[in-house]
């Protein structure tokens, strides 16, 4: 689908963003008008009911029983399992470095990664991929294979690891007269699947890759209607549901381990290692989420009837962004901040009057709680929770990293509050933003830059002012995933938001601007997700004043949000599929034969 000029320009020119227009506009004093009262919850003893009438989104209670979450524990926390892992690792290392056919090597690397073991073999995988790349460069017929499966797999693995591979490697599969992929490929399901997965590594302007995505998707769908083995059908469905490049590594590991077990070519030791490692990581996650459940109960914000009580889901955001076991600190403190982001979002979108929101924003900006008694009880409680948590995280960072992050963290809160205040002002004045105006602000109002900022300073070995200044400009590598969070959130949540009468979201702005139907507008927003990933794919190869795991956290944020909102509001509605991901991640270990 061709993008209208407005948006192709927007996507290309938005980053790097040096001047986010988040400055406070003192002349903008919208008249205070009572908000629509959808329904108040009669069961709640809300100290702030009365004037003005308050809205309540009537979010469902948490799926999770926090006593249960607190009690999570596993045998796999024992030291003896780590020793077993170390032994098995030696074995897999020799496999990775063994001399084999390039296809066997590529399949092995793909399996190791999808089994969730990439972090265990980072260096070895890189070396093995370098060998493939160098052999390729030294061989004239490196890309002359007629095997689509091999070519696409090699393309994908090389690009994933930052090697330059031209889209032209697919030229030989294209029919010169028709300019389309050759008709005889339609029946090569294995090749199509490999092409489909590769096509998500495209960059902007790569017409062959765009064509590869459309062609492979169409013919994979057709293949499902024809004669196809149950095993292949399972793999095709899995890929069409979401390509591997967009999948969260831990979620993919769960599926891939079960699948690999049934594979004729599977390696026993590799399988055992994957299961063991999965279970050990799960025991780490259990400790983290258990501690967080205690924190959340102590905070008491779950008692705020107007706000979402989603501790475990918020943990999943951080877990998705930085899954490697050593980064507990981010998952701990990042989750706390996301709990506050969501609660504050509910204050601005649902609970507070415009006057209260302006006061709230002003106190955040001045970082001064002296006058908070002007706010009603629930709102000042949220403000103080945010203030205290920020200071606690600041204290930890000062003690553990010798750095005072509080001024930077404050600034991020101001960006967020101003962005949601802007939406609240539009809402209260009945103003309908243009699509461009909306998307200029909306990737910030969703809280993504703040979550990413934390992923930097809570994982960096050494926090540098250079990196912080760079991050403050919201460079493209951060802007793209933030936009993807917004786009997917709007696709997943705007139906409910419109029903309860929230401010307009991307889908509705686009409908207003163009007169499109909701269906067309949704397709447009979905297409923007694909386009934004192309820019992100390029950005991931850049050099930056920061390193891993923050670089991957950006791509992982896009993956997390796609996992949450794939079929609707998997964040706000606790009964959805998110609980199944969380059960796999946190509760259910793999069974291991001893
Ligand atoms: C979105 O909810 C949501 F869950 C937020 C803001 C917290 C998690 C976000 C990140 C970790 C980035 P909702 O649909 O109410 O958000 P909007 O912005 O549409 O009000
Ligand atoms: Mn909201
Ligand atoms: Mn909001
Ligand atoms: Mn939303
Ligand atoms: Mn799509």
Image (cartoon, helix red, strand yellow):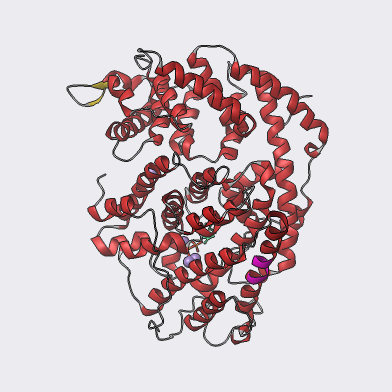
Foreground pick, 558 / 15: 15
Q: Is residue 9 magenta?
A: no
Quarter residue 204 falls in: top left
Could you tell me which residue is drawn at 34 percent across and 47 percent down?
A: 527
Horizontal relation, residue 325 to residue 320: left or right:
right
Could you tell me which residue is drawn at 60 percent across and 65 percent down?
A: 340
Quarter residue 457 falls in: bottom right
Looking at the image, is 205 positioned above or below residue 159?
below
Looking at the image, is 100 positioned above or below residue 110?
above
Looking at the figure, which quarter contains the N terminus?
A: top left
Looking at the image, is 130 positioned above or below residue 76?
above
Q: How many marks?
A: 0
Q: Is residue 390 magenta?
A: yes
Looking at the image, is 282 positioned above or below residue 561?
above
Type of secondary structure dominating the magenta stretch: helix
Foreground pick, 102 / 551: 551
Horizontal relation, residue 420 to residue 195: left or right:
right
Inspect this view and state whether residue 128 appears: yes
Horizontal relation, residue 93 to residue 160: left or right:
right
Looking at the figure, which quarter contains the C terminus?
A: top right
**Residue 229 position in % (x across, y down):** 47, 21
Quarter residue 222 falls in: top left
Horizontal relation, residue 355 to residue 217: left or right:
right
In the image, which residues are magenta? Answer: 387-391
**Residue 479 position in % (x across, y down):** 43, 53
**Residue 59 position in % (x across, y down):** 57, 65
Could you tell me which residue is drawn at 75 percent across and 55 percent down?
A: 291
Inspect this view and state whether residue 589 appears: no
**Residue 175 position in % (x across, y down):** 23, 21
């Amino acid at each position: 689908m061709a993008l209208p000029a407005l948006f192709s320009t927007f996507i290309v020119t938005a980053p790097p963003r040096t001047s986010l227009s988040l400055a406070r506009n003192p002349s903008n004093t919208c008249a205070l008008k009572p908000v629509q009262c959808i329904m108040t919850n009669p069961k709640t003893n809300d100290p702030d009911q009365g004037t003005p009438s308050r809205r309540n989104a009537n979010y469902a209670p948490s799926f999770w029983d926090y006593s249960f979450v607190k009690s999570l524990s596993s045998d796999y926390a024992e030291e003896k399992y780590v020793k077993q892992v170390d032994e098995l690792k030696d074995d897999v290392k020799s496999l990775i470095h063994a001399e084999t056919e390039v296809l066997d090597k590529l399949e092995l690397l793909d399996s190791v990664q999808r089994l969730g073991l990439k972090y265990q073999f980072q260096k070895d995988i890189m070396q093995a991929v370098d060998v493939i790349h160098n052999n390729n460069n030294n061989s004239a017929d490196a890309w002359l294979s007629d095997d689509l499966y091999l070519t696409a797999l090699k393309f994908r693995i090389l690009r994933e690891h930052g090697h330059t591979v031209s889209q032209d490697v697919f030229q030989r599969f294209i029919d010169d007269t028709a300019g389309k992929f050759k008709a005889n490929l339609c029946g090569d399901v294995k090749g199509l699947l490999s092409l489909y997965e590769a096509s998500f590594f495209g960059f902007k302007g790569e017409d062959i890759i765009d064509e590869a995505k459309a062609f492979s998707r169409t013919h994979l769908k057709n293949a499902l209607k024809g004669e196809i083995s149950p095993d292949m059908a399972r793999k095709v469905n899995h890929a069409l549901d979401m390509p591997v490049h967009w999948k969260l590594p831990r979620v993919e590991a769960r599926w891939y381990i079960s699948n690999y077990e049934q594979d004729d070519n599977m390696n026993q030791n590799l399988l055992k290692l994957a299961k063991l490692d999965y279970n050990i990581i799960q025991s780490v996650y259990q400790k983290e989420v258990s501690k967080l459940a205690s924190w959340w109960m102590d905070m008491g914000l779950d008692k705020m009837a107007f706000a979402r009580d989603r501790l475990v889901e918020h943990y999943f955001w951080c877990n998705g962004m930085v899954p490697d076991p050593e980064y507990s600190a981010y998952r701990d403190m990042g989750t706390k901040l996301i709990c506050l982001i969501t609660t504050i979002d509910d204050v601005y979108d649902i609970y507070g009057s415009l006057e209260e929101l302006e006061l709230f924003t002003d106190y955040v900006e001045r970082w001064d709680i002296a006058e908070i008694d002007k706010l009603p009880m629930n709102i000042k409680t949220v403000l103080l929770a945010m203030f205290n948590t920020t200071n606690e995280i600041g204290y930890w960072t000062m003690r553990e990293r010798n750095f005072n992050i509080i001024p930077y963290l404050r600034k991020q809160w101001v960006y967020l509050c101003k962005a949601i205040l802007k939406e609240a002002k539009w809402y209260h004045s009945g103003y309908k933003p243009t699509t461009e105006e909306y998307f200029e602000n909306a990737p910030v109002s969703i809280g993504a830059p703040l979550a990413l900022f934390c992923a930097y300073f809570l994982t960096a070995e050494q926090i540098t002012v250079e990196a912080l200044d760079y991050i403050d400009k919201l460079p493209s590598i951060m802007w793209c995933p933030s936009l993807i969070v917004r786009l997917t959130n709007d696709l997943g949540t705007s139906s409910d938001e419109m029903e309860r009468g929230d401010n307009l979201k991307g889908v509705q702005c686009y409908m207003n601007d163009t007169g499109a139907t909701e269906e067309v507008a949704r397709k447009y927003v979905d297409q923007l997700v694909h386009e934004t990933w192309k820019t992100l794919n390029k950005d991931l190869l850049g050099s930056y004043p920061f390193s891993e795991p923050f670089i991957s956290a950006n791509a992982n944020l896009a993956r997390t949000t796609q996992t949450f909102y794939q079929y609707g509001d998997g964040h706000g509605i606790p009964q959805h599929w998110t609980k199944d991901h969380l059960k796999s991640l946190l509760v259910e270990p793999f069974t291991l034969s001893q």
